[in-house]
Amino acid sequence: MNIAKNMEAIFVVAIALIGMTTFATASAPAAPAVIVAAADQAVPMQTVTVSAKRLTAAEKAASAQ
């Protein structure tokens, strides 16, 4: 069997399998309820603020060398 002649059929079958598995697993929950409930009670997300001056074009060129 020459695979090059049947490449289109192989591609169509692969896409059909991917599509079927997508629909078959679409109804599965994204995350367990325990993790979702624990995330509601978690501390707020930490943020980092960086305060620094931006380099001018001349300073960037000097530091690149």
Image: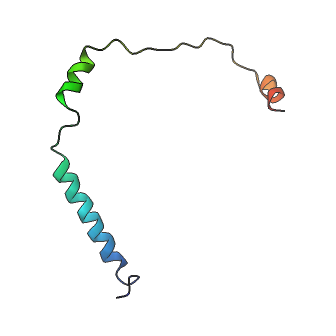
Q: In this view, does 60 lie to the left or right of 43?
A: right
**The image quarter in which residue 64 lies:** top right
Q: Which residue is drawn at 30% across and 14% down?
A: 42
Q: In this view, does 47 lie to the left or right of 26?
A: right
**Along the line of sight, which residue is nearer the eye, 57 or 49?**
49
Q: Residue at x 26, y 59 (%)?
A: 18
Q: Residue lying furthest bottom in this view?
A: 1
**The image quarter in which residue 45 lies:** top left
Q: Which residue is drawn at 43% across and 14% down?
A: 46
Q: In this view, does 15 lie to the left or right of 2?
A: left
Q: Residue at x 80, y 23 (%)?
A: 59
Image spot of residue 55 (x, y percent): 73, 20
In what quadrant of the picture does the N terminus appear? Answer: bottom left
Q: Coloured how?
A: rainbow
**Along the line of sight, which residue is nearer the eye, 13 or 61?**
13
Q: Check the image and report above or below for 11 versus 57.
A: below
Image spot of residue 49 (x, y percent): 54, 12
**Along the line of sight, which residue is nearer the eye, 41 or 4?**
41
In what quadrant of the picture does the C terminus appear? Answer: top right
Q: Check the image and report above or below for 65 versus 5.
A: above
Number of marks in the rendered image: 0
Image spot of residue 41 (x, y percent): 25, 13
Image spot of residue 47 (x, y percent): 47, 14
**Along the line of sight, which residue is nearer the eye, 45 or 55?**
45
Q: Check the image and report above or below for 38 versus 29.
A: above
Q: Check the image and report above or below for 13 versus 49.
A: below
